[in-house]
Amino acid sequence: MDKREIILKKVLGGVEYDRMVAYWNFKSLPVVALYGTFDVFHPSVFDLINFAAEQGKELVVGIKPDSQVKLELGRRFPVFNQKQRAAMVATHQLVSAVHICNEGVEAFLRRTKPAVAVCCANASEADKQSLEVVREWNGRVEIFNDSTTSVNDIISKY
């Protein structure tokens, strides 16, 4: 098995994802769910992942699907497709699993039932509001405020 295959094993969907979540719950490991686009990696993205990882034991990252990104940001986005973005996030050592959220953020969170849900301050208001669903099972919401650059700002500079 080459190193790329090892990394891509972290990108989970369907039954594989559900089994991993069930295992974490069985072991009583606090799960953190981080949701976002993760289109262009810049230093704040690494800070965001580190911040999220510090909130629990297992970090699962939900990737916004291409269709949703295009709907919100226009046809120029995303720069990288959802599989590429998932692979980039999966390379981070602190990430336990990556899930492409074709079902939407709220369904992803209900499926995962994290102790903590995290997004960055540049997330859409709709995404931030969707995180509130974790309060139904006494989860908490954390907004990472140290991100100073949005993807739109980065792209427009180049």
Image: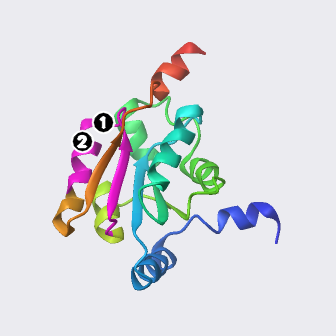
- Kind of residue sitting beneath label 1: Ser
**Horizontal and vertical percent for residue 70?**
42, 37
Tell me, yes or no, whether the highlighted magenta stretch contains residue 115.
yes
Outermost residue on the top side: it is 157
Question: What residue appears at the point 20 percent right and 69 percent down from the top-left corner?
Answer: 137
Tell me, yes or no, whether the highlighted magenta stretch contains residue 123.
yes
Number of other residues with Cα within 10 Å of mark 1, as a class: few under 14, some 14 to 19, many 20 or more: few
Mark 1, residue position: 124
Quadrant hosting residue 103: bottom left
Question: What residue appears at the point 37 percent right and 33 percent down from the top-left corner?
Answer: 145
Please count the marks in the image. 2
Question: What residue appears at the point 49 percent right and 77 percent down from the top-left corner?
Answer: 20
**Horizontal and vertical percent for residue 123?**
35, 37
Q: Which residues are magenta?
A: 113-132
**Horizontal and vertical percent for residue 89?**
59, 51
Q: Which mark is residue 126?
A: 2
Any part of residue 70 in sight: yes
Quadrant the N terminus occupies? bottom right
**Horizontal and vertical percent for residue 69?**
42, 40
- Kind of residue sitting beneath label 2: Ala
Question: What residue appears at the point 40 percent right and 50 percent down from the top-left corner?
Answer: 35
Viewer-closest of 141 and 4 = 141
Number of other residues with Cα within 10 Å of mark 2, as a class: few under 14, some 14 to 19, many 20 or more: few
Report the side of 101 relative to 158 (left or right).
left
Asked if the residue under mark 1 is in contact with the one under mark 2, i.e. CB atoms within 8 Å, the reply is: yes
Quadrant the C terminus occupies? top right
Viewer-closest of 22 and 30 = 30
